[in-house]
Image (spheres, rainbow, N blue to C red):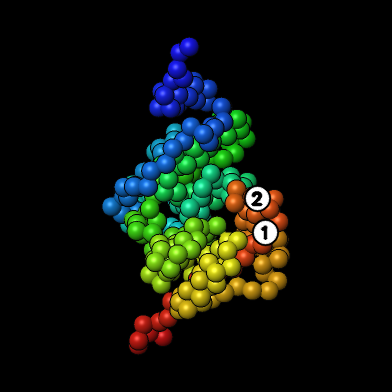
Amino acid sequence: MPADPPKRQKRVEYKKFLAADEAALPKKKFYRQRAHANPPKSPGDMDWASLYPAYAVQKLAEEEDKNVMTVDESRADEGAEFQDQMKARGTVQEVEIADIGCGFGGLLFALATKFPETLSLGMEIRMSVTEYVQDKIRALRAQNAENRTYQNIGCLRANTMKFLPNFFRKQQLRAIFLCFPDPHFKQRKHKARIVSTTLCSEYAYVLRPGGYVYTITDVRDLHEWMVGHFEGHESFIRVEGKALEDEEGEVGKCVATMKIETEEGKKVERNKGEKFVAVFRRVDDPAWPGET
């Protein structure tokens, strides 16, 4: 009786199958894991057009029979330097929402329809999981070619704990999601948690004033750890009260989506566990001495 083909061969054959059928959804079992990821040298080195082809400068210029780039009027006052940066990135608008540690992309796919006019990016360190999300995005785009849904989301492999500012310019983002991060229970592993004093400063760097960091976990100790670090950082203030429950507002909509759309959130729901949510707003930077 012949032996089963090795896993590598099965995976190669499966990738050929996906390449032949654009609309075929990926299967998680064919995606393995690896932790290393090479970052761009700076945000200007990112090839955003490959992640968001529908927003690529060249593609839109062809569709509109134009030879110049259309720039968002709200950013036009930043002048030629901004336009040059946009051309280098190859898209007519920037990513504004980052799902850090996006896993298999449950939240990311929900953001595609919740915020259809906004570019959202999933960032995941595991190579196989990143490939799964990328293949699912490709399949969903093919399945929804007529209404152009899911063109506004992308996913890349990244170690954000080390290289977040390599991907985003200062004050670029309006929202960051930290959903069910690894709790790293042992005290000696706490330095590997996704929230620390240094990382809070990096989140503040890429978030615009008035932007938000959304956190959720089912581990009380980790929740208290994240709250303590963000509340202890001068760039953030905690959001509490009705804003978290008002699903008509952006904060409430994000909180409600974050609770139910992630794979971990669904697992906690099935197990009747508790979810701990906290939201933090990026405050304005203080004026320099002598400024009015």
Image height of 10 relative to 113, above or below: above
Q: Residue at x 32, y 50 (%)?
A: 39
Residue where numbered disc 2 is placed:
266
Helix, strand or loop status at disc 1: loop
Q: Residue at (31%, 54%) from the top-left corner?
A: 42
Looking at this view, name the residue that lies furthest to the bottom: 290
Q: Is residue 140 visible?
A: yes
Image-quadrant location for residue 239: bottom right
Visible in this render: residue 174?
no
Most extreme residue toward the front is 1
Give the residue at the far left of this rendering. 41
User: Of the numbered discs in the image, which one, if any, rests on residue 205?
Assistant: none
Q: Is residue 255 left or right of residue 102?
A: right
Image side of residue 168 versus residue 209, left or right: left
Q: Which quadrant would the C terminus be assigned to in this image?
A: bottom left
The kind of residue on which mark 2 rests is: Lys
**SS under mark 2:** helix
Amino acid tagged 1 = Gly
Choose mark 1 or mark 2, whichever is in front. 1
Q: How many marks?
A: 2
Question: In terms of sequence position, does the residue under pointer 1 or pointer 2 come before the other?
Answer: 2
The residue that disc 1 covers is: 273
Quick one: which residue is furthest to the top in this view?
1
Q: Is residue 245 above or below residue 116?
A: below
Q: Nearer the viewer, residue 35 or 166?
A: 35
